[in-house]
Image (cartoon, rainbow, N blue to C red):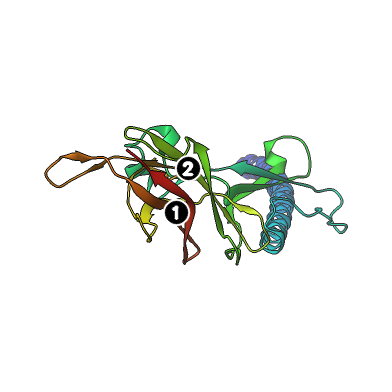
C-alpha cells in the first residue's frame, strides 16, 4: 500500500516536472525566436545605415571634385540607380573663419574683422530612406575652393572711392582694391596692405596712409608726423600701393598718381 502511494507521488512529481520543463522550453524557444527576430531587424537597420554612409561619402567626393574643377559652389546630380529608395540632397552653408584666428580678431569691431567667408563653405550631404530621424544620415565637411593664380595683367585694380586730387592739408582720398584671378574673376577673401611711394621726378613726395584693419580701404592724406610729433604738410606727387597674398603669391600694385598741395 505504501509502495503504491510512493509510486503515485513519484509519478505526480514527474508529470509536474515534465509540464514545467515544457513551459521552460517553450519560453526559451520564444525568447530565442524574439532575439533572432530582433537580430534580423538590427542587421537590417545597420545595413541601411551603412548604405547611407557609403552614398553620402560618394556624393561628398563628387562635390569636392566639382568644386576643384569649376571653382563654383554647385553640387552634381545625386544619381544612384542601384539604390532608388535613397534620396540624396546637398546643402551649402556659409561659414565664417577668421584670419589669423578668432581670438585675435574678436578685439576688433565686426565690420573690420579679417574674415574668410567666400573661399570655404560648410557642405552637408543629407541621405534619407524613410520618415523620421532614424532613417536619415547627414555628413558634414568643410570644403575649400581650389588654389588660384593671379591674373597676369593688372592682378590688383585700385580705384578712387572718395576724394579728388590735389590733396590739400587736412584732406584725403579713399581707395578700394580688387584682386582678379587668371580667369578674370574677382578674388574674395583678400586682405590688402596699403603703402605710399613717391613719384620720382621734379617734385616727389609721400603722404600719410591709413587703412582699415581688414585692408578693405586705404586712405591717403596730406599730413605726416615727424619723430618729434610735429605734423607736416607736403607738396608733390605720390602713389598709393596695395599688396595682397594669394596662395603664397605676393603681388603689389600702384594706384593712380595723386598730387599733394599746400
Q: Position of residue 75 (x, y in %)?
A: 74, 52
Seen at 60% across and 41% down, the residue is: 2
Seen at 56% across and 49% down, the residue is: 188
Q: CA distance from mark 2 to mark 1?
A: 10 Å
C-beta proximity under 8 Å, tags 2 and 1 = yes
Residues 238 and 60: in front is 238
Considering the numbered disc 2 on the image, is that residue within a helix, a strand or a loop?
strand
Q: Position of residue 140 (x, y in %)?
A: 60, 49
Q: Position of residue 244 (x, y in %)?
A: 46, 57
Q: Is residue 19 visible?
A: no
Residues 247 and 146: in front is 247
Q: Residues within 10 Å of mark 1 (few under 14, many from 20)?
A: many
Tally the numbered discs.
2
Considering the numbered disc 1 on the image, is that residue within a helix, a strand or a loop?
strand
Residue 110 found in image quarter: top left
Residues 103 and 139: in front is 103
Indicate the quadrant containing the C terminus: top left, top right, bottom left or bottom right: top left
Residue 145 found in image quarter: bottom right
Which residue in the structure is indicated by mark 2?
A: 175
Q: Position of residue 30 (x, y in %)?
A: 72, 44
Numbered tag placed on residue 199 in the rendering: none
Q: Does residue 101 lie above or below 168 as drawn?
A: below
Q: Does residue 157 lie above or below 251 as drawn?
A: above
Numbered tag placed on residue 242 in the rendering: 1
Amino acid at each position: 500500500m505504501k509502495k503504491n502511494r510512493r509510486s503515485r507521488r513519484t509519478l505526480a512529481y514527474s508529470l509536474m516536472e515534465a509540464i514545467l520543463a515544457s513551459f521552460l522550453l517553450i519560453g526559451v524557444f520564444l525568447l530565442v525566436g524574439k532575439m533572432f527576430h530582433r537580430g534580423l531587424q538590427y542587421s537590417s537597420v545597420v545595413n541601411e545605415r551603412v548604405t547611407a554612409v557609403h552614398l553620402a561619402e560618394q556624393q561628398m567626393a563628387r562635390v569636392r571634385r566639382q568644386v576643384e574643377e569649376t571653382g563654383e559652389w554647385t553640387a552634381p546630380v545625386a544619381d544612384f540607380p542601384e539604390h532608388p529608395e535613397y534620396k540624396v540632397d546637398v546643402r551649402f552653408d556659409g561659414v565664417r573663419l577668421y584670419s589669423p584666428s578668432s581670438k585675435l580678431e574678436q578685439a576688433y569691431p565686426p565690420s573690420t574683422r579679417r574674415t574668410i567667408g567666400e573661399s570655404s563653405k560648410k557642405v552637408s550631404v543629407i541621405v534619407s530612406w524613410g520618415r523620421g530621424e532614424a532613417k536619415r544620415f547627414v555628413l558634414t565637411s568643410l570644403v575649400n575652393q581650389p588654389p588660384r593664380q593671379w591674373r597676369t595683367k593688372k592682378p590688383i585694380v585700385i580705384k578712387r572711392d572718395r576724394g579728388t586730387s590735389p590733396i590739400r592739408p587736412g584732406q584725403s582720398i579713399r581707395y578700394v582694391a580688387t584682386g582678379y584671378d587668371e580667369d578674370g574673376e574677382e578674388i574674395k577673401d583678400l586682405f590688402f596692405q596699403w603703402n605710399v611711394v613717391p613719384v620720382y621726378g621734379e617734385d616727389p613726395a609721400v603722404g600719410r596712409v591709413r587703412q582699415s584693419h581688414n585692408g578693405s580701404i586705404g586712405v591717403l592724406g596730406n599730413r605726416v608726423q615727424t619723430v618729434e610729433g610735429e605734423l607736416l604738410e607736403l607738396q608733390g606727387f605720390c602713389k598709393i600701393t596695395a599688396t595682397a597674398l594669394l596662395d603664397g603669391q605676393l603681388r603689389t600694385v600702384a594706384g593712380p598718381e595723386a598730387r599733394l598741395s599746400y
